[in-house]
Amino acid sequence: MAPVAKSDRLLAALTAIHNFYVRRLDGTTAAERFFGRAHSALFDQVLAHVDLPPPARRRRPRPASLPALTLVAA
């Protein structure tokens, strides 16, 4: 089996979004018409199936830097 090109994966992802998001004038989506029932919101589906990344690490405070040159009174 040949490897799937990036553009093919992108097209598949955009098709899925289109099928679950775009509504006709009667208020139904292509996915609702295909499966014969209403579905939950697309964003809720994504959140249910994708692991969220861990929270960002807190930065440690930087130590105070000493000035490279100090002014000396002449």
Image (cartoon, rainbow, N blue to C red):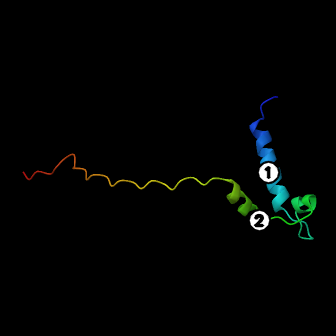
> Please, what secondary structure does the residue beneath circle 2 have?
loop
Q: In x, y percent, where is residue 18?
A: 83, 56
Q: In x, y percent, where is residue 2?
A: 81, 29
Distance from the alpha carbon under mark 2 to that under mark 1: 16 Å
Q: In x, y percent, where is residue 12?
A: 81, 46
Q: In x, y percent, where is residue 14?
A: 79, 51
Q: Residue at x 22, y 49 (%)?
A: 67
Question: 32 or 65: nearer the eye?
Answer: 32
Q: Residue at x 76, y 65 (%)?
A: 41
Q: Residue 37, labelled with which disc?
A: none
Kindly identify the amino acid type of the residue bearing the numbered disc 2.
Ala
Left or right: 11, with 37 as reference point: left
Left or right: 60, with 32 as reference point: left
Kindly identify the amino acid type of the residue bearing the numbered disc 1.
Leu
Q: Which residue, as the protein is rendered here, is positioned at the far bottom?
A: 26
Question: 4 or 47: nearer the eye?
Answer: 47
Q: Residue at x 77, y 42 (%)?
A: 9
Q: Residue 41, labelled with which disc?
A: 2
Q: Which residue is mark 1?
A: 14
Q: Which quarter of the rendered picture does the N terminus lie within? A: top right
Q: Is residue 55 above or below residue 26?
A: above
Q: Earlier in the sequence, mark 2 or mark 1?
A: 1
The quarter holding residue 48 reads bottom right
Q: Which residue, as the protein is rendered here, is positioned at the far left?
A: 74
> Please, what secondary structure does the residue beneath circle 1 have?
helix
Question: Mark 2, mark 1: which one is toward the viewer?
Answer: 2
Label 2 crowding class (10 Å Cα cut-off): few <14, some 14-19, many 20+?
Answer: few
